[in-house]
Image: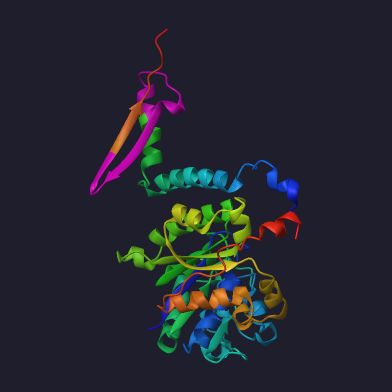
Amino acid sequence: MGIFDYFRSTPPKSASVAKERLQIIVARERAHRSGPDYLPALHRELLAVIRKYVQVDDQAVQMNLEREGDCEVLELNITLPDKD
Amino acid sequence: MARIVVITSGKGGVGKTTTSAAIATGLALAGHKTAVLDFDVGLRNLDLIMGCERRVVYDFVNVINGDANLRQALIKDKRTDNLFILPASQTRDKEALTQDGVERVLNELSQDFEFVICDSPAGIERGAMMASYFADEAIVVTNPEVSSVRDSDRMLGILASKSRRAERGESAMPARLLMTRYSPERVQKGEMLSIEDVQDILSIDLLGVIPESQAVLNASNSGVPVVLDEASDAGQAYMDAVARFLGEERPHRFTTFEKKSFFGRLFGG
């Protein structure tokens, strides 16, 4: 490294990008695997029931399982389509 | 009763076999009777790293099938006392490693040895599951590289749920991190995840940090576990990890980069 390199602006740090990406994906994968096995099936069946009455897409049902101490909360978020 | 330790990672090529050979040799050097087992059925390599590839007569699957007894299959290390190697089978039949069979072999080894080191294959297939299922504790080998860290996290999840300890409802399997191929210089430049970064993500205790080192390739080239290269940085870092494994407190070495002086930088030294 010579004198000119010394004054060059610092390049973007790839390690911090790596850390950020890892934190996001690892958190997502942990949430997925810590959930009970029946979640995907429950999701499918809920969609089917809702579609008996309203046409919604796959993203309309969002499920989120949260743990607080001994208590587990299953949060369901169903987005209905906009009225014409 | 032996302590059964699995050396695992999920991702391949991060140094599981190098680590198994180094830790097992280190434990034997410290006077503990140790067996090191290759679970990579079909892709035997521990024998090569330990330098005993020409002395393999019987293997793990032979013992499971009753074609040989343990005494016949275990290879006594020529360099280090107290150290024995059980090579993997070269069979392509992945089902050969039965759970009952592995349990029988581990039970028999447990009566005779202080430590049983299980060298896990990469991936999460049968060999890897069998290597970790009966373990008392795990050493997770990780490179400071995104795919390795992610796979290690996946493996930690498997250790926590798919082991005998977990199925019996015992306390979680203790797992410690062994970081390999670490380059403090690249960390300082912001080009490599630091030990702290990886620990933040995986949230497990750190057993050791092995610096990126030419000694590792030299060691595997000649079939001598790297801990026997006492002058090398990697050999010393592995011996530190072994000491910590045995309960000693030791500071981590080879983890910081010595900056060159201003004049060194100026003249491109």
Residue B53, x across and y down, in percent: 68, 82
Q: Is residue A60 magenta?
A: yes
The answer to whether B222 appears left or right of B38 in the picture is right
The answer to whether B124 appears left or right of B268 in the picture is left
The answer to whether B228 appears left or right of B104 in the picture is right
Residue B233, x across and y down, in percent: 61, 74
Residue depicted at x 58% and y 52%: B147
Between A37 and B241, the one lying in front of the other is B241
Residue B87 falls in image quadrant: bottom right
Residue depicted at x 53% and y 80%: B24
Q: Is residue B69 above or below residue B241?
A: below
Q: Is residue B162 magenta?
A: no
Q: Is residue A15 above or below residue B114?
A: above
Taking the image as drawn, is residue B24 in sight?
Answer: yes
Q: Quadrant of the N terminus of chain B?
A: bottom left
The stretch of residues the image draws in magenta is: A47-73
Residue B137, x across and y down, in percent: 41, 70
Between B31 and B129, the one lying in front of the other is B31
Q: Residue furthest top?
A: A84
Taking the image as drawn, is residue B20 in sight?
Answer: no
Q: Quadrant of the C terminus of chain B?
A: bottom right
Residue B101, x across and y down, in percent: 47, 76
